[in-house]
Image (cartoon, grey):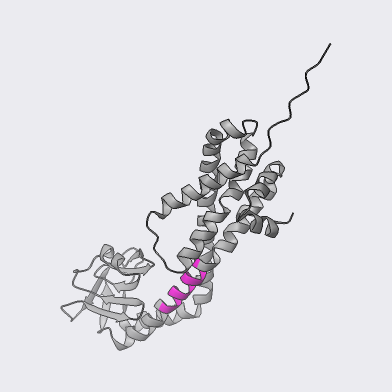
Amino acid sequence: MNIAKQFVRSLHSPETIAKFRFQKIGKTILYVFFLMLITSIPMAVVIGSNLNNIYQDIDTHLTESFPDFQIQNGVLQSETDEPVIIDDQDTTLIFDPTGEYTPADTAQFDNAFALLEREAVLNTDGFPQTFGYQEFGLDLTKDQLDDLVNTVGDLMPLIITVVILIMYLFTTALKFLGIFTLSVITLLLKRKVADQLTYKQGWILSAYAVTLPTVLFAVIEGLGLNLPFSFAIYWVIAIVMMNLVLKNIPAPRQAPEETN
């Protein structure tokens, strides 16, 4: 059975998953990369769209809405004495040379870009990334920053690709960690229903048992929905699926007793 068919069957058939226990470990590892490639698509689309929207808003409002400024000796300097906050659809732009806002304050916005007193902050999906002016040796004016933004715009396809690739590798690494955790739990679950199962077989079955919760939560995240207790729900689904898989593993055949 090819990987695509395994993916479809693993969504709904514990009986089929149970048959994969004799599969080679290499194909199972390849399946995990395939699973994460498929389930990363919704989030990749969201990340790409958000980064592009943030760039477009920065490019527009940097010249039109932000006052004149310069960054010198690691500090944002401007004649304005209060923060400038711009809400543009799904993106919030903040210009604050006063020190009133901190990087942590930007986490309240889903997507935001902020020029603060001593750092710039790029916030996507509520996760702020901070870039200190002093750390990067930035000494520039508003016009110079505008030129830099235009240069970044030319590189946006490459930047988005790199960000998505890093996201894919990171989530795949976490998935392998989750599979390992489920395989350890399987050692406890198997005692009453499939005690003959080896750890290797349990790990292989765990890789397929996480398919349903992984796909389910990828769709939920792609739709931008916030599901309470999502971590607990994920593990309940994974453990229940694994328990159903174990129940579909036939008991070992008993050797016939010798008779005199």
In depth, the one of 213 and 117 nearer the eye is 213
Would residue 55 be visible to someone looking at this image? yes
In depth, the one of 107 and 257 nearer the eye is 257
Q: In the rendered image of this protein, does residue 142 appear above or below residue 14?
A: below
Single out the residue that lies furthest toward the top: 260
**Is residue 22 one of those drawn in magenta?**
no
Q: In the rendered image of this protein, does residue 19 appear above or below residue 157?
A: above
In depth, the one of 83 and 26 nearer the eye is 26
Single out the residue that lies furthest toward the front: 260
Single out the residue that lies furthest toward the right: 260
The N terminus is located in which quarter? bottom right
x%, y% of residue 162? 52, 66
Would residue 177 be visible to someone looking at this image? no
Predominant secondary structure, magenta span: helix
The residue positioned 37% from the left and 57% from the top of the image is 228
Residues in magenta? 43-53
The C terminus is located in which quarter? top right
In depth, the one of 240 and 98 nearer the eye is 240
x%, y% of residue 220? 47, 64
x%, y% of residue 212? 56, 55
Left/right of residue 26 with respect to residue 119 in the rendered view: right
The residue positioned 60% from the left and 56% from the top of the image is 11
Report the number of discs.
Answer: 0
Left/right of residue 84 with respect to residue 151 in the rendered view: left
The residue positioned 33% from the left and 83% from the top of the image is 62
Left/right of residue 105 with respect to residue 155 in the rendered view: left
| Quadrant in which residue 149 is drawn | bottom left
Q: In the rendered image of this protein, does residue 236 appear above or below residue 75?
A: above
Single out the residue that lies furthest toward the left: 81
x%, y% of residue 30? 66, 53
